[in-house]
Amino acid sequence: MGAVGVEGPVVPVGAGGGVDAADPVGGSCFRTRDVDEARGELDARYYANRMAVVDRERRPFVARFDTVALGPLVIGDLSCGADVRMTFGELGAYHLNAPLSGMMEMRQGGSPLVATPGEAVLLDPAGDTFLDRWSGDCRTLAVKIGAAALRDRLEQLIGRPPRGPLILGPVLDITRGPGLSWVRFARQVAAEALAGEGLARHELVAAPLQEALLNGLLLAAEHPWREALAHPGEPRRPAPVKRVMDAVRERPEHPFTTTELAVLARVSVRRLQESFREYVGMSPMAYVREVRLDRVREELRAAAPDGVSVSEVAWRWGFAHQGRFAARYREKFGESPSCTLRASR
């Protein structure tokens, strides 16, 4: 988990039991001395988990969790007072831990990771995650980032669906440069959202702030498209292309045809195809398939145990040929659709 360096309202903590001062927009100031209550709060705000205190005699367990939900992001200022360890399954979202003090020792997919005040850790949506030690003196900025939202934002910025999975570098320097700037920005946004009547709560301001946080993370973290974002060279997509891309993302389940897309774009079929090849790097119908593949992955990852089969989901999203579907899915996401479904279970 991770932290916002902003003091929330101080809520008295009793001998046991938790206090959660929540508000309608997703803000919460939670305090407790009870480990099960703390686990439940992190389950509700972040991920299902198991939590255990490592050395209760050395430091008393006093959980302080100030969190705020901002669209696809959850930003939290978290501390436990005592050393704890935690286990998770797959997170299903990107996650950043940026300690303001202390340290966090983690593993994901077998790789050891250490978050410190100088170096944040970025966790991937896939792979079982273990927090081997969350030091009692560690107060950390914990940011959960929706995987689909971050990938969609990258697509909008580069003007085409990204080829392959979006894998972020596991560490982020937060002592200088973009990493430090992003952490400061996230803390400031969270503080404003928790303050009560700040503009960060207004929908006209909240949506641009969320978009700016996603943009900033894509500029700060290591990934294959970072250089293209840092030094954009492509011209902006023309209006006909943008109209079609917006329509497809809004209704990917619709049985679009090239002719219908040309009508939506208000240009000829030939002009639309030429524009898509120039600005998106593929045909309009190929773009429709790319968006539908993203939706298939989202549905497989969210599937209930034994609730669906790969073929059912693929068919529902218009993929009738299972072999070609599976091959394209593996090419784009680096794993088979059945692996994605098994991981969700």
Image (cartoon, helix red, strand yellow):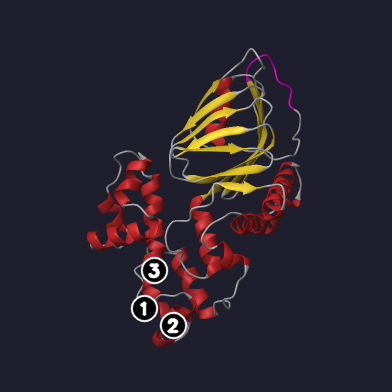
Q: Is residue 78 magenta?
A: no
- What residue is rendered at 68% in x and 42% in y? 118
The amino acid sitting under disc 1 is Thr
Label at residue 307: none
Q: Which mark is residue 288?
A: 3
> What amino acid is found at the position of numbered circle 3 in the picture?
Val
Q: Main secondary structure of the magenta part?
A: loop
**What x and y, as percent, mark residue 96?**
59, 44
Labels 3 and 1: the sequence-earlier one: 1
* Element assignment for label 2: helix
Residue found 66% across the figure and 59% down from its top: 208
Between the residue at mark 2 and the residue at mark 3, the CA separation in whole angstroms equals 14 Å
Cα distance, mark 3 to mark 1?
10 Å
Quarter of the image for the C terminus: give it.
Answer: top left
Badge 2 vs badge 3, beta-carbon distance below 8 Å? no
**Residue type indicated by callout 2:** Leu
Give me the disc on residue 258: 1
The magenta region covers: 11-17
Question: Is 14 a magenta residue?
Answer: yes
Residue 201: give x, y in percent of width and height: 70, 49
Mark 2 or 3 closer to N-term? 2
Residue that appears at 72% across and 51% down: 176
Residue beneath label 2, please?
A: 272
- Is there any visible trace of residue 28 in the rendered image? no
> Closest to the observer: 164 or 207?
164
- Contact (Cβ within 8 Å) of mark 2 with mark 1: yes
